[in-house]
Every structure is written in C-alpha cells, then in structure tokens.
Amino acid sequence: MVRLPYLTALTTLFSYGLLFAFGQMRDFFRKILDLWKSKNLQGYAPICLGLEDFYTRRLYLRIQDCFNRPIAGAPDAWIDVVERYSKDSNKTLHRTSKINKCINLGSYNYLGFAAADEYCTPRVIESLKQYSPSTCSARVDGGTTKLHAELEEVVARFVGKPAAILFGMGYATNSAIIPALIGKGGLIISDSLNHNSIVNGARGSGATVRVFQHNSAAHLEEVLREQIAEGQPRTHRPWKKIIVIIEGIYSMEGELCKLPEIIAVCKKYKAYTYLDEAHSIGAIGKSGRGVCELLGVDTADMDIMMGTFTKSFGSCGGYIAASKEIIQHLKNTCPAHFYATSMSPPAAQQVISAIKVVLGEDGSNRGAQKLAQIRDNSNFFRSELHKMGFEVLGDNDSPVMPIMLYNPAKIPAFSRECLRRNLAVVTVAFPATPLLLARARICISASHTREDMIKALEVISKVGDLVGIKYFPVEPQKHLTDKIQKKLE
Amino acid sequence: MAKLYEEKTTPPDLNKNTEWLMYPGVWTTYILIVFFWWLVVLSVSGCSLGAAWTVVNLVHFAITFQFFHWTKGTPFAEDQGVYNNLTWWEQIDNGKQLTRNRKFLTVVPLVLYLIASHTTDHQKPMLLLNTIAVIILVGAKCPNMHEVHLLGINGDRWPASAPLEDHDR
C-alpha cells in the first residue's frame, strides 16, 4: 500500500511525459539525419526494432552513472566505490583510479558475512587450497564434493525440511527448477510482485501463468476458484497441478508475505506452494530460519522452499529444500543439475561456516548477536526515517527499506548527492518498479554500527531536504537530536 | 488534512507499458497538458481563440494517433516482445474493452472537437479538418476495431511465431 501526494502524482506523470516527448523528438531527428548516412547492414536484419530500446537509449543512458558502479573491495559496512567520469554526457563512462570510501547501504549483507569473518574466512581459505576455486564439472559428472553433500544436509537441517539440492546461482535456481516441476497443462499462480527469476522460470515452463494481487489471500482464493472451475484453456480439462509461488520478503517493497493466510487458502484448494526466501532466510526469525519461523508457520506445510546464499550468508548460489521424493526427482530431471557447473567449493564452505555461526555451533553466541543486531538496526533505522518525514515501505523487522522518490529527476539527484557525501545507495526506477513508484532501496546489515547509521541518517536527511522527498510531516527537529544523543549513550 | 494523500494498492497489470494508467492523477495530467498547450499556442501565435483550439485539436490528433494507434510494442525489452503486434490502445487494461480509461480517452477528442468547432463558429475549412480528425480518432477507438487493420495498413510485419511442439510428459 503506497500513499503518494496527489500533486506528486501529477508532477511525476508530467515529468515522464516530458522525458518521453524529448526522447521521441531526438529519435525523430536522428531518423532524419540517418537517412543521409548509408546503412551497412549488408542484408542482415537490425538487432533492435526502433521502439524496443527507446527506454534504454533516451532515459536510462542519461542517468547511467547511478547504476553499475564498480567497487574495489569487499562489500562490508563500508565500501570502496571507484570514481567514474564521462566526456559525452553519460553515453560512455571511464573509470579513474580514485576510490571513495562510502557507507554501504546497498549490499545484501544482512548478517555481515560479506567481509572477512573470524570463523568463516580461515576455513574458506583452507577449502580453497584443498578443493580449488571450481569443480570444473557438473554435479552429475564430477562436481559433487564432500562439501556439497555436507552443505545439502546442513541447509536441509537449517530450513527444517528432509532434503535439499544446491545450485551455483540463485537466479538460475528459480528459472531452472520451475520448468522441471511443472509443464504444459499445469497452472502457476504467482504474486504480482514476484522477482524476475520466477517470472522467467514460469514463462519457460510452458504452464499457464496467472497472477494474483500482491499479498491478497482473498484475491488468491478468487483466482484459484475461477481457474479450478474453468480448467485448462480451450479443453477445460482439469489442471495437471497447481503451484502457487510467493516470496518471503519482497525485495522492492521490504514487506513480508502474509504466509499463514495464503497457506490456508492453498491447503483448502489443494494447490502446491513454492516459497522463495531469497531475502528472508538467515535475516529474520528468532534463530534466522526465515519467514516461516517469524510468522509461526510449520515448514511441513510448505511444499518447496527455495532460497539463496547471496544475501545473508555472504556466498553465491541457491538451494531448494523439500521432501526427499521431490529432491530425488529434481536430481533426476533438473537441467541445472545435469549441465550447469556445480557450486564453487569455497563458496559452499562459506555457507557451511556461516550457518554454523548462525546456529551457534561454532561455540560462540555471535550468531544470536548478529540476529539481534540486524533486528535492532532495521527497526531503529526505519523509525528514524519515518520520523524525518520520509515515506518508507516495509514491515517492522525487515532489513530492506525502500525510500520513495517518485519523480524521475529525483533518482539521479538522490543517488549522486549521496555519493558526493560518501553514502552508497541503490536507486531503482521503471521498469523494475511501477512507473510512478521510483525508490531508493536501503539494505541494513548487522555489521552497521550505531555511529555508521547515525551518520547515514544525517546524510539522508540533508539530501532529502535538498531533493525534496520528505513527503510527510516531520517531528520537531530539536527532540530528534536529543533522542539520538540519548540513544548513543 | 484528510484527503491529502491518495491510497492505492498495487494493481496486477503485468504490462509495464500500460499499468501506469491505474494510478491517480493521470486524467487530470492529460487535461492539464492539453490546456497548457492551448495557452502556449495562444501566447506564441496571437491568433484567435478558435484557431488556437483547432491547432491544439489537430496536433492532439497527430500525436495521439501516432502513439496510441500506430506504434506497436513497448519501449523496453524486458517483456521479450510479447506485445510487439499490439498498439498501445490495444494493450491497455489487458485488452478489455469499454473500461473507464478507454471511455475517458474516447471522450477527450470528442470534447476537443466540440470546443474547437464551437469557438470557430463552424466555419468551413477548419470544420472539415476537425471532423476528419475526430472521426479517425473515435473510429480507431471503437471496440470493433480491436486488432483490425483496415486495408492492411500497419498490419503485422512479423507474423506471430508458430506454436511450440506439444511435449507430453
């Protein structure tokens, strides 16, 4: 649920109209000027139709310096951003050798494992020496090491399911598994704000895809009833199977999914459930076991639980946890298991060590400390931003908090001003988000200290005033600084 | 202080090219832009009110015909070209006819026509141009014209690909 001031809606639409009009005019003149130049296509078809890359050429390239920023070190609480310059108004960017040390509010480093860790890093280096960086083989050929088998058991135990299977890439996990689970004649019902990997997997599977309104169990029930009653398109035969796909934390909204209600609806209509916990595993829940633990849902009620190791565990790769039969079926049919190179062994060791720290099996209570820290950090940051008058999305306890920007011009303004003040943020615009709802997405980490966060809040407040994104009334300034001083003590 | 903010739940329209129509303020912005351009034409050229409305009507016809009923597809590549054979008008509201947005967009050229012909006192040359403009625009927006290309004008350049083979598991 987003609240935007009416005037902001008008000005945002007007801005996009203006950008669109300018882009079309430039395209028009470019077309005329190019009539005189000869096209040396030599009979080949052009790669892009004229309209397809309009957004990239005329809107994205203008603010290209806010995206794809190269970094020069590990993405810890502080990050080294490489400076770039452009001589032709952002069409091409060149790196310099200067590096800015910035507070990192953009990396998915929820538990702080992204940089060197006292327990994980020595073990990772040891496994690197023993197993080398790559297995150079698919899982089914020669790519299953002892670490992979151990990690599958550890993940299954951590998530609370009987078995698990690993993949080298989180995105590829979704886009390769969904076609292996369902095909033509099946029905996929996915949340309207699901991640691109799920959308691509659903498209690639060949099943019919229907969408239900974000987080609305009532609309899901409506869609289920309608689809079960109608059956497959044209033949009206019953569906071969129905899978409902939802996410734990939606990365663009920062909000949790309404798991108990949705599971109740799925059980009533006998649909399978697929939960993508990319952002929630390891980050929420009392012992870090994700959204099921936080909302009190029994993991036996979820049929398939998917997650990635990139966010909370500081590694790369993804996993699927389900019953032994489903995992065995996936090991026999999934193309990513047969043909894709297996997960890098040091990366697997990193996840094993990180999970051991989170569970407290390394002999210390750093795991519990990290979980408490990220919860406190997220709640503190979110409440302070609310008090400053920003529109911040997301539920309490969620470490992802998008700050709404709305106007297209505020996206590069916010991004560049923050970078100038040594704060690295990620801004997201159309088409990753709806047109009117551009935002800056903040990801809080357990490795952010209070001083880091207060400094970041000061910068964001100053930039927010400059750019004009404090849409809601502000609490009186005097009390705010007093409260921050009190909290520091 | 009550209605200062609009509350909107995210709509499930998957086509990012058209889902911005569901948000508040779109109709108002459209009307304000037309009005603004009428003022600009008046201030720049200093012609009569009627001539300014005629100019606005004709330019509105050219722009909306080009962008609503001529260019096909979407200005970005993320949807992998599933809408490449549909004009913007055919894409909005998932192809459903006679929705509120469509009715509003059909009424606007009619209202502009009425204003333009009234303020020019229905004089001969401008009346003809205005009438042609409104007939083409409103005709193109008829539900019966959905995906119809008269005389093959602006028809499919690349026909839809053959359906995939039936893999029965």
Image (cartoon, helix red, strand yellow):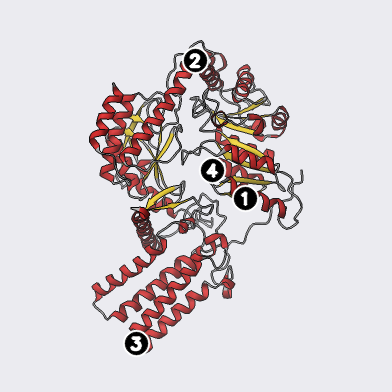
- Give the alpha-carbon distance from disc 3 to disc 2, as whole Å: 86 Å
Q: Which residue is mark 1?
A: A210
Left or right, residue A453 beside residue A288: left
Q: Are marks 3 and 4 on the same chain?
A: no
Amino acid found under the numbered disc labelled 3 = Asp
Q: In terms of sequence position, does the residue under pointer 4 or pointer 1 come before the other?
A: 4
**Nearer mark to the viewer, of 3 and 4:** 3
Q: Are marks 4 and 1 in contact (CB under 8 Å)?
A: no
Q: Quadrant of the C terminus of chain A?
A: top left
Q: Are marks 1 and 2 on the same chain?
A: yes
- Give the alpha-carbon distance from disc 1 to disc 2, as whole Å: 46 Å
Q: Which residue is mark 4?
A: A196
- From the top left corner, tell me how far across and down residue B120 is, in percent: 33, 84
- Give the alpha-carbon distance from disc 4 to disc 1, as whole Å: 15 Å
Q: Residue A413: which disc? A: none
Q: Which residue is mark 2?
A: A125
**Subunit bearing disc 2:** A
Q: Which quarter of the figure has residue A143?
A: top right
**Subunit bearing disc 3:** B
